[in-house]
Image (spheres, rainbow, N blue to C red):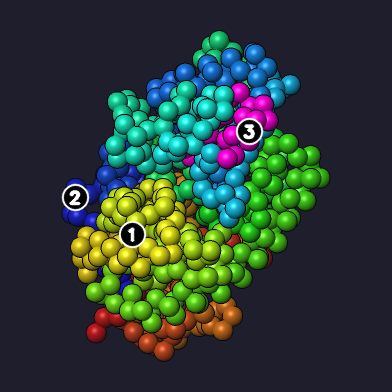
Amino acid sequence: MTHRWLLPTAGPPAASDGAGTRAGTPGALSALAARVLAARGLGDGETGARFLEPKLADLHNPSLLPGVDQAAQRILDALNARERIAIYGDYDVDGVCAAAILHHVILHIRPDADVVAYVPHRIDEGYGLNAEALRKLAHDGARLIVSVDCGVTAREPALAARDAGADLIITDHHNLPSDHALLPHAYAIVHPRLPGSAYPFGELCGAGVAFKLAWRLATLAHGSERVAEPTRRLLLDLLALAALGTIADIVPLLDENRVIARFGLGRLRSTDLIGLNALIEAADLAGSNIDAEQVGFVLGPRLNACGRMGHARDAVEMFTTATRGRALQIARELNRLNDQRRASERAIAAQAVEMAEAAGMTADDRRAIVLACEGWSPGVIGIVCSRLVERYHRPTLLLQRDNGLCQGSGRSIDGFCLHDALESCADLLDRFGGHDMAAGLAVSADRFDAFAERFIALANERLSPDHLTPSLRIDCDASLEELTPDAVRQLERLGPFGRSNPAPSVRLTGVRLAGPPEPLGAHGKHLALRIGAGTRVMRVVAWNWGQRRAQLHAGDEVELVVEPKISTWNARRGGLPAVEPTLKDLARRA
């Protein structure tokens, strides 16, 4: 057992009819899916129905978003006055998609608009608004600059934009300054959690905020809440970009984020956006039913690789102005950059693991990992942070040391707000920004040791030993007999899966290993387990369990936590789809 298993609290049994389907929900719902819904507080018919069948009408009115009317009107005024508009984005998936969303809607409203998109270079400029770039945009003629996915803490750069003669609109979703008096001076700030906000949902990503601004721009331009059909089709295409940002930025897939993800994923199969189709084609996903997992592990990493290993302006070009030929060229280059990113990630991860263990940062009395090293790629260390968090389950900061400055990224675990911890170290930092689970930071090399000592002390103070053992939330118990293809397909209706709406996990008890574990993959890194109960035998895939092969034997009595899945391997070979769960954890029973 590698996790603390969190079982659902006892509650009333889910209602079901005699056929094992739940009453009060749309369509026939399996008893297993009904139990999962009940475990997640969605057991009554109306709540479950709204969750299972979200509608576009469930999206909140964009006019409720603080600052959006003022921002949209200023953009329309700029278009009418033929002022140059600069969109200032970010170099990750969310920032790239947000910039593309705004760029598309502006050119849709006025095809001859003077609009440019700018994204900073990750290494040369770093995250967020920077004064030099804003001054350059203003010098080049931009009278209006609109930030997307950044800017809400950029007080000094905002003053630079004002002094350069440009109006600045900030659209962002990151954490606000703890002292709201320190919010930047801007023409408008569009943010779902601004002080006094009545917006019903505060967890939009940057692309989600940009989509709401695009929607409001469209309705203002039309002078009506109902827009013409071409505009409606464009907004649906932009919803696909918003879904990419929503899933890749790991915001909670609840409320309207669930609507954005569900309908945006559906739109990926029929989008008119040239760049999006090129990305999908180059990733060999053309014609596929793209889900959140493929966004998170196939499309998202390619887009991020552009900013990590090259320049994210190429991804913005692919999504905005590129012809089909140019878009395919960029998309194929993203494949190459992603391969390069993977190789760099493996090398840095091996070095970081060695350093962390040598420094004693993986012991129970050191509840955070803080490392700095020369030669680490700033574009990759954020991913390596995530790998170390997965391995050691503690907050991790990795920084590149170069020319007297250490700068890098951090990732955290539930129970430890990374932004709050960095704020407690603000006097030692040159800059920082982010949210609860992820952040970027820079610190002078001569203050790094003092910063690392204080950060680790904060982690020791705020985290208990229990926090260092990852928890595994189990939705319900299930039997092998229940895991039929139809029942597992019913579970898929709970998707898209991601943060705050994970794929269902069920516990299988009273089962045995029906044979010895079989190695899978290169060097037996993974295992295939055959489990049985009664006369039923099922194959379970155990990713990254190869090192435990010798501990598992045919005939062992076990309990497993699995994620029920349908294997498409048989179907691709002309056979019937088969249930093939993925192992989450295993406990042997004496």
Name the residue tied to disc 1: 413
Q: Nearer the viewer, residue 43 or 393?
A: 393
Relative height, residue 51 to residue 212 (above, below)? below
The residue segment tinted magenta is 132-152
What residue lies at 30% left-to-right and 62% top-to-bottom?
Answer: 455
Q: Earlier in the sequence, mark 1 or mark 3?
A: 3
What residue lies at 46% left-to-right and 74% top-to-bottom?
Answer: 352
State which quadrant residue 442 falls in: bottom left
Q: Secondary structure beneath disc 3?
A: helix
The residues bearing labels 2 and 3 have C-alpha atoms spaced at a distance of 59 Å
Mark 1 vs mark 2: in front: 1
The x, y position of residue 575, in whole percent, is: 62, 64
User: Where's the N terminus, which quadrant?
Assistant: bottom left
Number of numbered labels in the structure image: 3
Circle 1 residues within 10 Å: few <14, some 14–19, many ≥20: many
User: Where's the C terminus, which quadrant?
Assistant: bottom left
Q: Nearer the viewer, residue 183 or 156?
A: 156
Circle 3 residues within 10 Å: few <14, some 14–19, many ≥20: many
The x, y position of residue 485, in whole percent, is: 48, 58
The residues bearing labels 1 and 3 have C-alpha atoms spaced at a distance of 38 Å
Mark linked to residue 79: none
Name the residue tied to disc 2: 11
Name the residue tied to disc 3: 137
What residue lies at 49% left-to-right and 77% top-to-bottom?
Answer: 351
Amino acid type assigned to the residue bearing label 2 in the image: Gly
Residue 348 in view here: yes
Mark 2 vs mark 3: in front: 3
